[in-house]
């Protein structure tokens, strides 16, 4: 499985360095799989309608068509229909906006996340899940509510479509049904942690700016559970870093390193 790293949405919140929407594009003999989508064409065409003013003010996204997954996939020489599957860490706007660009793909999502997104819960309903609520639902949605496996001690499941190359790993807190996506990478694993942390320092013990810590806490649906999840990831970072590489969705430095 070949792993490509795409930035599908540059964010420029005031007071911090630019951030990315780190998306994985997995290429196998069976087709392409996206892990998250970042922003999509409909977000670029109608930012206010799709994303809402509060999100745009908070993260100030570039919303450049060339950053959408569909544009980058075309630039690589693929067709949109080559994307057979999309695996979601969660359904927040900056992760799910591109789903509409791949209506034929199977969507894999945590069942609780799906229910919450449809029910509009959360501390900031004006921000959370807007594109999903305005989307044309994909024809095939596979939701998961059982996690019988253990992936480095975390409850997880495999996806019927991807065998042992991929694990869907529970990382709750940011949202109730927030997940990580572990992809086999050579002899080890790459774990896309979505928004389980915002900055590499959140799991490595390095400094995390106050503004970032505040944003992380303010955006978590369950702050206490989110802290527990970060501690589990920090433990993985400390004890399994020779086997597991952690990336989050928005850290531009991690993204650049991953591409390098
Ligand atoms: Zn996010």
Image (tube, rainbow, N blue to C red):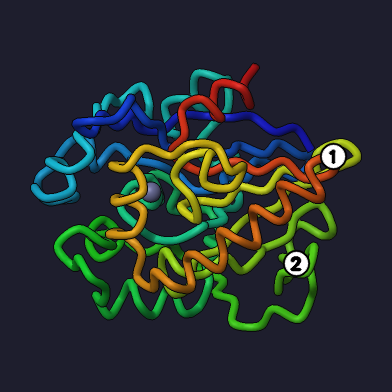
Mark 2 burial class by Cα count in 10 Å: few <14, some 14-19, many 20+: many
Q: Is residue 158 left or right of residue 135?
A: right
The local secondary structure at tag 1 comes to loop
Residue picked out by circle 2: 158
Q: CA distance from mark 2 to mark 1?
A: 22 Å
Residue picked out by circle 1: 242
Query: Where is residue 241 drawn, in percent x and y?
Result: 78, 42
Q: Is residue 208 above or below residue 225?
A: above
The local secondary structure at tag 2 comes to strand
| Earlier residue among tags 2 and 1 | 2
Residue 37 visible at all: yes
Q: Nearer the viewer, mark 2 or mark 1?
A: 1
Quadrant of the rendered image containing residue 243: top right
Locate the N terminus by quadrant.
Answer: top right
Locate the C terminus by quadrant.
Answer: top right
Quadrant of the rendered image containing residue 46: top left
What residue is at 80 percent from the left and 50 percent from the top?
Answer: 239
Q: Is residue 250 left or right of residue 97?
A: right
């Amino acid at each position: 499985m070949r792993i490509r790293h795409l930035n599908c949405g540059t964010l420029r919140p005031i007071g911090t360095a630019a951030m990315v929407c780190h998306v994985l594009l997995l290429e196998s003999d069976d087709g392409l799989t996206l892990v998250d989508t970042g922003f999509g064409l409909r977000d670029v065409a109608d930012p206010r309608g799709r994303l809402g003013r509060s999100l745009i003010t908070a993260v100030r996204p570039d919303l450049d068509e060339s950053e959408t997954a569909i544009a980058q996939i075309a630039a690589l020489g693929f067709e949109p229909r080559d994307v057979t599957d999309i695996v979601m860490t969660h359904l927040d706007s900056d992760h799910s906006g591109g789903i509409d660009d791949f209506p034929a793909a199977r969507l894999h999502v945590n069942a609780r996340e799906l229910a919450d997104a449809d029910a509009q819960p959360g501390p900031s309903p004006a921000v959370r899940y807007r594109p999903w609520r305005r989307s044309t639902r994909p024809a095939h949605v596979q939701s998961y509510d059982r996690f019988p496996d253990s992936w480095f001690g975390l409850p997880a499941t495999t996806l019927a479509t991807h065998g042992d190359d991929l694990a869907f790993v529970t990382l709750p807190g940011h949202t109730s049904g927030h997940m990580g996506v572990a992809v086999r990478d050579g002899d080890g694993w790459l774990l896309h942690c979505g928004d389980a942390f915002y900055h590499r320092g959140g799991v490595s013990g390095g400094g995390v700016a106050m503004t970032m810590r505040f944003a992380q806490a303010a955006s978590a649906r369950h702050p206490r559970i989110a802290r527990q999840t970060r501690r589990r990831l920090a433990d993985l970072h400390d004890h399994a870093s020779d086997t597991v590489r952690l990336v989050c969705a928005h850290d531009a430095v991690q993204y650049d390193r991953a591409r390098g």
